[in-house]
Image (cartoon, grey):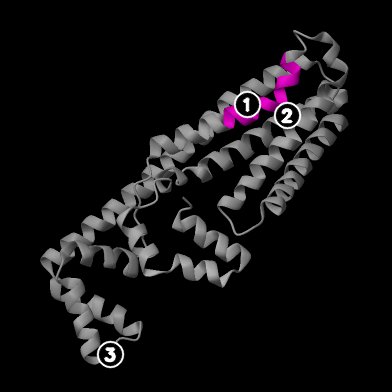
Amino acid sequence: MVSRRALLKKAYRKKDTQLSQQAHSKVSIKEALTHPDHHQDSGKYIGDAVYGAIDGIVTTFAIVSGVVGADLSPNIILILGFANLLADGFSMAAGNYLSTKSEHAYEQQEYERESWEIENYPEGEIEEIRQIYRKKGFKGKDLERAVKIITSDKERWLRCMMIEELGILQDDKSATKGALVTFFSFLLCGFLPLLTFVLIYFFPQLETRAFLYSCIMTALTIFLVGSLRSLLIAKSWLMAGLEMLLVGGAAAAVSYLIGYLLSGLA
């Protein structure tokens, strides 16, 4: 069964008002609120997987291109390539972890501050709610009723202050899971440009065309991973894939050119 979220995305992509109406029916909305999309939690990590994969394959292939441009031994490709995979992959995962932990710490700090203010000076916080909803267009009795409803429940009150006053949308995304997804997607996709150079040791006849096969495999992977960005952004899978292929190709071309120009230093 197609989820409501998927139906909404499809309706927007095709600009289909009938599909949109179907997704906004009372039954559909009630079902979605009663039984949330089970894929929603895993969807939090799509961005980590996509960007980890893109960074892994582009940076590794840039190293491959630079070494080939400098006409160095395939052994150099493997040494630099695997060093990049482990070091850069770990660095990117660690950065993701620390960034997410910092965001969560900031959100928790602001949550606790707002909770303390509600406990110790509720009049001021009530006035903030009043001003927020007055700005939204509420007036008179409607305004006071909205303020009363919101401030009658502390948790609802806190959520409202976090979103409306501070612009903070709290989430329960795991910093550890995000880092692991980033690291392993980086390793998996970053290894592909190196695969043909690893296979040379088992099939020496591949050496003359190793770079060509690496280019083909890398281009296909970059396009595939780039097309997955369409899950995150309002862009067709074809355009998202071609856009990322262009960026990856440009990075590889620059690296190859630098390697070629500096080949005399090796």
Q: Is residue 83 visible?
A: yes
At 47% from the left edge and 42% from the top edge, which residue is drawn? 45
Disc 1 from disc 2: Cα separation: 8 Å
The span shown in magenta is 186-198
Position of residue 103 measured from the top left corner of the image (x, y, whole percent): 38, 49
Query: Of helix, strand and loop, which mostly describes the magenta segment?
Result: helix
* Along the line of sight, the residue nearer the viewer: 231 or 261: 231
In this image, 224 relative to 24: left or right? Answer: right
Q: In the rendered structure, which amino acid carries the disc numbered 3?
A: Lys
Disc 2 from disc 3: Cα separation: 63 Å
In this image, 23 relative to 152: left or right? Answer: right
Position of residue 164 measured from the top left corner of the image (x, y, whole percent): 33, 70
At 86% from the left edge and 25% from the top edge, which residue is drawn? 263
Mark number, residue 63 = 2
Residue 192 belongs to magenta span = yes
Q: In the rendered structure, which amino acid carries the disc numbered 1?
A: Asn
Mark 2 vs mark 3: in front: 3
The C terminus lies in quadrant: top right
Q: In the rendered structure, which amino acid carries the disc numbered 2?
A: Ile
Residue behind mark 3: 139
* Structural crowding at the residue carrying mark 1, measured as other residues with C-alpha within 10 Å and reported as few (<14), some (14–19) or many (≥20): some
* Structural crowding at the residue carrying mark 3, measured as other residues with C-alpha within 10 Å and reported as few (<14), some (14–19) or many (≥20): some
* Marks 1 & 2, CB-CB < 8 Å contact: yes
Q: Earlier in the sequence, mark 2 or mark 3?
A: 2
Disc 1 from disc 3: Cα separation: 60 Å
Residue behind mark 1: 84
Residue 48 belongs to magenta span = no
Position of residue 127 measured from the top left corner of the image (x, y, whole percent): 21, 79
Task: Relative to 73, say whether 114 is above or below.
Answer: below
Identify the element where label 3 is drawn.
loop
* Structural crowding at the residue carrying mark 2, measured as other residues with C-alpha within 10 Å and reported as few (<14), some (14–19) or many (≥20): many
